[in-house]
Image (cartoon, rainbow, N blue to C red):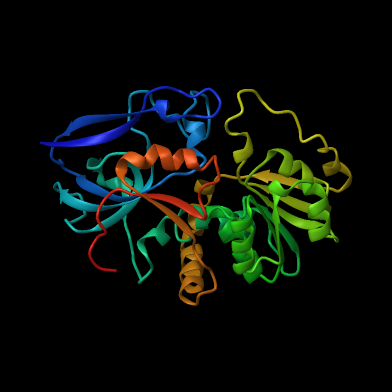
Amino acid sequence: MSITREIRLDRRPVGRPGQDCFGLAEVTLAPPGPGEVEIRPVLLSVDPYMRGRMDDRPSYVPPFALGAPIEGFGIATVEAAGPDAGFAPGDVVTGMLRWRELDVLPARRLRRLERHGEPLEAHLGPLGMTGFTAYVGLTDVGGLRPGETVLVTGAAGAVGSVAGQIAKLAGCRVVGVAGGAQKVARLRELGFDQAIDYRAGDLPRALRQAAPDGVDLFFDNVGGDQLEAALGLMTVGGRVVLCGAIAQYNDEAPRPGPRNLALAIGRRLTLRGFIVGDYEARRPAFEAAMRRWLAEGRVQADSTIVEGFERLPEAFLGLFEGTNLGKMLVRVGPEPAGR
């Protein structure tokens, strides 16, 4: 038997969550049985979609249970394996992991990580769910075409920064919106043609100056006022990819708007949401392309890594303060051996 710590959801938030939503507890684990593995998490990802799971409401993924550990994507090392698990001690695996320092999970929930010299964190960023989201959102959902003007909000975040770089690789003109001078400067380093600080005021005017001929494809991670401002710039036949709405996740009541949605009629716009899990068949093509781009230095991956298991709630809450540049991760265990 092993004793480990876990971080639980202790109460459901009203509006923006705080540290009091989380609790730290000790639990006892039995050894892995048939088809199970004992794992030690190394890196755990915190992502904006997890905010929706803190509420008890129907969604595309079940809510977190009160008094139970929170879970999210992560990378772990196998410590021990039961019969017929298909893994061996020392294997590096990835999957949906509970916020525990040590855990026992069914082996079917995990997949072995194939490493080709990339830093470990890349497998939760450009090679992970966030990179995959950017890829299918642009190509499969948005119908990305060379020569178009592409607008990305949340452009310095995990998904947005990769989306902008993929659009540039496709031969597009790319405009990014982010918060703060540091993030805007980073977008320019990543090759964005125009970078806008939404905190500087008058976003609609700044967008018009950055995209005087309009926007053909809008990849939205923010929603709210930024979605409304972008709709006013869309070209006839333009496409809006609705990937996220982080500006609204902590709203206590539904937010009205966008007030100019009627523009979608005359401009014949397509507004389409998507869930990346529906596109699993596209993963091999994505991984082959992304590995090549990373190896060639054509895609750069930013990560903000917070050290320490107890700081998982702090890192998650920081997403809504904009404290991350690129992917927000928490290191909770030692780096596995090998590359």
Badge count: 0
Q: Quadrant of residue 249?
A: top right
Residue 269 vs residue 119: left or right? right
The answer to whether 35 is drawn above or below residue 113 in the figure is above
Image x and y of residue 294, in percent:
48, 71
Q: Where the N terminus falls, by quadrant?
A: top left
Q: Nearer the viewer, residue 290 or 324?
A: 324
Q: Residue furthest left?
A: 1
Residue 218 vs residue 302: left or right? right
Image x and y of residue 296, in percent:
49, 77
Please give the name of the residue rendered at 73% of the width and 56% of the height, measured from the top-left corner. 217
Residue 31 vs residue 236: left or right? left
Please give the name of the residue rendered at 59% of the width and 57% of the height, measured from the top-left corner. 182
The answer to whether 325 is drawn above or below residue 337 in the figure is above
Image x and y of residue 228, in percent:
77, 41
Q: Nearer the viewer, residue 168 or 191?
A: 191
Q: Quadrant of residue 169?
A: bottom right
Q: Where the C terminus falls, by quadrant?
A: bottom left
Query: Is residue 133 at all visible to an observer of this figure?
Result: no
Please give the name of the residue rendered at 60% of the width and 43% of the height, measured from the top-left corner. 244
Query: Is residue 259 at all visible to an observer of this figure?
Result: yes
Please give the name of the residue rendered at 68% of the width and 59% of the height, measured from the top-left corner. 143
Q: Nearer the viewer, residue 46 or 306?
A: 306
Q: Residue furthest right?
A: 266
Q: Nearer the viewer, residue 125 or 279?
A: 125
Residue 279 vs residue 6: left or right? right
Q: Residue furthest bottom?
A: 296
